[in-house]
Image (tube, rainbow, N blue to C red):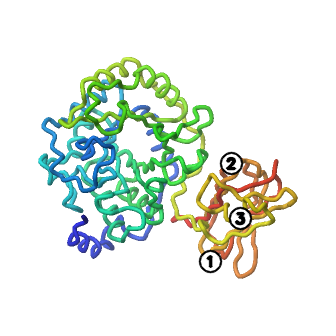
Amino acid sequence: MINSRVWAALLASALLLPGLKSTAQKIDAEQLRKDQQDFVNLGFGMFIHYGIATYVDEDWADPNAPASLFNPKKLDANQWAQAAKSANMTYGCLTTKHHSGFPIWDTKTTSYNVMNSPLKRDVVKEYADAFRKAGLKVMLYYSILDTHHKLRPNQITKAHVEMVKEQIRELLTNYGDISALIIDGWDAPWSRITYDEIPFEEIYQLVKSIQPHCLVMDLNAAKYPAEALFYTDIKSYEQGAGQHISKETNKLPALSCLPLQNNWFWKTSMPRARLKSPEEMVNKNLVPFNQAYCNFILNVAPNRDGLFDENALVALKEIGKLYKRPASLPAFPEADAPIISHNKAKFQPANSSWSGDYAIMDFGNDDRFGSAWNSHPSVKQPWFEVELSGDKGVNLITITEEGKITQYRLEYELNGVWKTLVNGTNKSRVKVHRFDRVWADKVRIVIEEYTDTPSINEFGVYNERR
């Protein structure tokens, strides 16, 4: 459970902490692009799923599993780093806290952590020190979902939000340069924790205020279209969850991940189990992904002693014989900046020109990219609008559709008067428009030209911090 005295102190001092100020950290677009390209250029890295789940033969541990279970006898992060180097990897990423909520660093936010296990050592520190010593970049994984501390759907409190912020602050303050923070358990169908309950923009700004070059990555890419960076600096694809990058059409900086073994966390069967083929990892993943602006991260799970099994070490050496990172990798094309703000249009009252009963206006802002508002074929100049429930600041609009809309007008209404924001000719499936802030009661799209009967999967309205 969250330590109540700790959180009373944190809440009382929150306004004094720089990363929790209301002023936004200004993100330099040119620098962000360089950081994204640097990540793509790394080519290949090691995911390390290690935590209390290692000791229960499950990928998701019992949230009440006692800390006494975490008891490695030979933990050696230097072995992990040398194994990564043997595979010609350039970085590592360790699970600092998985979904069951057991931090493996010296956190002050909860007593349920590695320092109160038999090990009593800061695993994150040992990992970071070992990988840096080996000349490897350091990244960290962090789960928003935390079942031990009841940070789960419909139970999230202000104290939970502060816990997340303070844990991220610790991770980005105490362990040197962190190239990326890979976040999981957020806005996924199985976690159901929205970017509003744990506010994405606040977390993103906090990360950048502490380490401006640290990339923020959300592993849950499946919901959002592949043509834009919604709520992430890097588009991610978890192959085991059915998320597969298009090697032919991808134009965004990306990450694809797989476990070398059959599961993410170690299982008792793994020392004898068949691993994924090194040839397949290199020829079907690494080489083609690297040419498609995509970095590949391969998970290797330490065993209960805190070491990699011999069969995993052999496989990694074989991969290293087959893979040599190219001296230079392609630069990804120009892309819109990540969309990180609260979507003001989500679930708001919507109106439109005539549409079929099976696809009315509500489908155009239901936060589901698989559904859509469809215009009736007889309407010559369709329109779709969203009410904002009083005048709201707006400086970004996104339209996700099937690529049928070729010319359109974006308008806003204030005090009963409609004004033009944008005359658009963007033919992309995802159209992103940023502009100077206006105040609006309603916003709408008027569709002027199209190649087939228009539809809109999602109409997004945002007020970015700039």
Q: Nearer the viewer, mark 1 or mark 3?
A: 3
Q: In x, y percent, where is residue 278?
A: 40, 22
Q: Amino acid at mark 1?
A: Ser
Q: In x, y percent, where is residue 394?
A: 61, 69
Question: Marks 1 and 3, Cα distance to the nearest angstrom?
Answer: 17 Å
116 displayed left or right of 52: left
Q: Residue at x 51, y 47 (%)?
A: 221
Q: Nearer the viewer, mark 2 or mark 3?
A: 3
In this orientation, which residue lies closer to the viewer: 172 or 230?
230
User: Could you tell me which secondary element the residue under label 1 belongs to?
Assistant: strand
Q: Which residue is mark 3?
A: 361
User: Could you tell me which secondary element the residue under label 2 belongs to?
Assistant: loop
Q: In x, y percent, where is residue 287?
A: 49, 25
399 displayed left or right of 296: right
Q: Which residue is mark 2?
A: 429
Q: Which residue is mark 1?
A: 389
> Marks 2 and 1: in contact by CB < 8 Å?
no
Sequence order check, earlier mark of 1 and 3? 3
Q: Amino acid at mark 2?
A: Arg
Against 98, residue 387 (above or below) is below
